[in-house]
């Protein structure tokens, strides 16, 4: 099993969710996040005082998937979140040792 | 006594009272979310304390007829010698006293903008009591008491100050500067972002101030008459012109107009027209407003160069705006609409009036700055005025008031950040 984490542009979130749902991904955890990479923040001005707002709002989504679905999920996220401009975000994959479904106590693949 | 005059001053007094909660919103929106309650509470502390002082001795020190040019007398202590039939001009003295009380409240509340986020509340309460007693009541007497033993600025110097450019705005502005120096800069000033947390609050506050200011200025005619009408129109148009001036300045510098600039321009215009509301024509008021808007928009940048954390620009808006209004009377005053009998330099008059305006402005500025600095230092050295750094970083609302303005954690569903019972 793998944990797929993606940081994407907030306005692409709906497309990504629909694409993942069509691909059979049943659930995920989503958080509002702040960060920066190549995309810089912006400048705000209050009574002439300029503030550099460094952090850019992002959506971070996490989904634990079966080994054989990893490439498909990463590909689905990449395609649906892409605008081609800087700030589109990142997707990364890390191994997961075990998963337990709290309601039933099922473990690993059965818990996904 | 005139019932029309009485009715208008009663209504005006209520309008001026509303300015202080309005100011609380104007200032509160400009602070960070962790200190909005403290900022608003500083205004409410003035609302709570000053009326009590007013009854005990404030009104007497400001307006009792038994005094000198520097201070009122003692025969109005506890509102002694005032009854429902006691007249002040064409209105009952109680009505005049109620109206003037509201000026004392807001003048003190205005000062709080320079010390956002970092003033111990106990220190502020002591400051309100001492400052009202030692600075406001005497200065109000100088400027607003036109009686037989009236104030020296009103009756001897005869500088023009219709509604308080000196006694309210230069006074509060100079005091704000002194307190900003006494308390020092906020932790992280210039390094951490200190953006306004709620600009709609700021705009709401500016709107309430503008509304209430019609009572402040048109009420200062102390009658329901043509002079009140002139002051009303001048207040409306100078404020509008100052918004135009402030936004124009921003458009040239930043290429964009900001909502904070619009709200600030409105207040700058209101401040500037306060002393001049009865002395100018509506056209002169537009000129005054434009000048105040541009000049105050520039003035709020000075603190960054001077290294003074006048947090919400009490100096840039009230001191500078008050000076603009008080001094421009020397140029723009006109006897044409009949509000005053003098003409300024631009209307064929001589420089006499300008000289009087300079003396009045300088006297109030110097008196307020020096005494406020001394009062602030004494409070800081005795009970302590400046909040400790850890409390300041945590947030003054939590530390000084045991409250948070906004319950972010409770906005959806269950939360791990619940409070215990």
Image (cartoon, coloured by chain):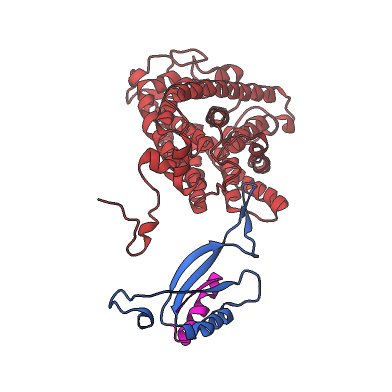
Chain colours: A blue, B red
Give percent across and percent down for residue B359: 64, 21
B285 in magenta: no
Q: State the image quarter where residue A86 is shown.
A: bottom right
Camera-nearest residue between A85 and B11: A85
How many marks on residues?
0
Looking at this rendering, what residue extends furthest in the front direction? Answer: A97
Camera-nearest residue between B317 and A90: A90
Q: State the image quarter where residue B281 is shown.
A: top right
When the figure is inspected, residue A13 is found, relative to residue A23, above or below; the finding is: above
Magenta region, residue range? A1-25
Tell me the quarter of the image containing the N terminus of chain B.
top left
Q: State the image quarter where residue B11 is shown.
A: top left
When the figure is inspected, residue B158 is found, relative to residue B125, above or below; the finding is: above
Looking at the image, can residue B15 be seen? no
Camera-nearest residue between B63 and B298: B298
When the figure is inspected, residue B375 is found, relative to residue B407, above or below; the finding is: above
Give percent across and percent down for residue B181: 57, 29
- Side of B107 where A108 appears, left or right: left
When the figure is inspected, residue B80 is found, relative to residue B227, above or below; the finding is: above
């Amino acid at each position: 099993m793998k944990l797929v984490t993606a940081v994407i542009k907030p306005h692409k979130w709906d497309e990504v969710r629909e694409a993942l749902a069509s691909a059979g991904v049943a659930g995920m955890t989503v958080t509002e996040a702040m960060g920066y990479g190549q995309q810089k923040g912006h400048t705000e001005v209050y009574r002439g005082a300029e503030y550099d707002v460094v952090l850019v709002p992002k959506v971070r989504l996490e989904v634990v998937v079966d080994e054989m679905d990893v490439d498909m999920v990463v590909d689905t996220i990449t395609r649906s979140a892409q605008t081609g401009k800087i700030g589109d975000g990142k997707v990364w994959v890390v191994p997961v040792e075990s998963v337990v479904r709290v309601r039933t106590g099922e473990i690993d693949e059965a818990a996904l | 006594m005139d019932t029309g005059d009485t009715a208008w001053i009663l209504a005006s007094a209520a309008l001026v009272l509303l300015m202080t909660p309005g100011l609380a919103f104007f200032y509160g929106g400009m602070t960070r979310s962790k200190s909005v309650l403290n900022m608003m509470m500083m205004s409410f502390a003035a609302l709570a304390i000053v009326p009590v002082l007013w009854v005990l001795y404030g009104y007497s020190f400001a307006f009792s007829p038994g005094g000198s040019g520097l201070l009122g007398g003692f025969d109005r202590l506890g509102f002694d010698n005032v009854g429902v039939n006691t007249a002040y001009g064409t209105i009952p003295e109680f009505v005049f006293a109620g109206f003037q009380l509201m000026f004392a409240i807001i003048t003190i509340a205005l000062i709080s903008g320079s010390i956002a986020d970092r003033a111990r509340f106990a220190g502020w309460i002591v400051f309100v009591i001492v400052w009202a007693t030692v600075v406001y009541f005497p200065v109000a007497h100088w400027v607003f008491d036109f009686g037989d033993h009236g104030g020296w600025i009103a009756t001897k110097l005869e500088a023009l100050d219709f509604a308080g450019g000196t006694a309210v705005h230069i006074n509060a502005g100079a005091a704000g500067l002194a307190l900003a120096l006494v308390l020092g800069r906020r932790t992280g000033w210039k390094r951490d972002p200190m953006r306004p947390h709620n600009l709609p609050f700021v705009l709401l506050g500016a709107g309430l101030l503008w509304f209430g200011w019609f009572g402040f200025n048109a009420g200062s005619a102390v009658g329901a008459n043509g002079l009140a009408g002139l002051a009303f129109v001048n207040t409306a148009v100078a404020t509008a012109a100052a918004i135009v001036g402030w936004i124009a300045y921003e458009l040239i510098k930043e290429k964009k107009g900001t909502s904070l600039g619009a709200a600030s321009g409105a207040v700058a215009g209101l401040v500037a027209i306060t002393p001049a509301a009865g002395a100018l024509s509506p056209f002169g008021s537009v000129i005054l407003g434009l000048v105040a808007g541009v000049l105050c928009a520039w003035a709020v940048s000075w603190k960054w160069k001077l290294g003074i954390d006048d947090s919400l620009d009490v100096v840039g808006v009230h001191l500078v705006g008050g000076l603009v209004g008080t001094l421009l009377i020397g140029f723009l005053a006109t006897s044409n609409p009949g509000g005053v009998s003098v003409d300024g330099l631009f209307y064929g008059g001589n420089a006499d009036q300008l000289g009087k305006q300079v003396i009045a402005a300088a006297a109030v500025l110097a008196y307020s700055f020096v005494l406020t600095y001394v009062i602030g230092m004494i409070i800081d050295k005795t009970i302590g005025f400046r909040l400790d750094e850890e409390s300041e970083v945590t947030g003054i609302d939590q530390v000084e008031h045991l409250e948070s303005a906004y319950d972010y954690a409770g906005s959806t569903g269950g939360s791990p950040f619940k409070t215990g019972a």
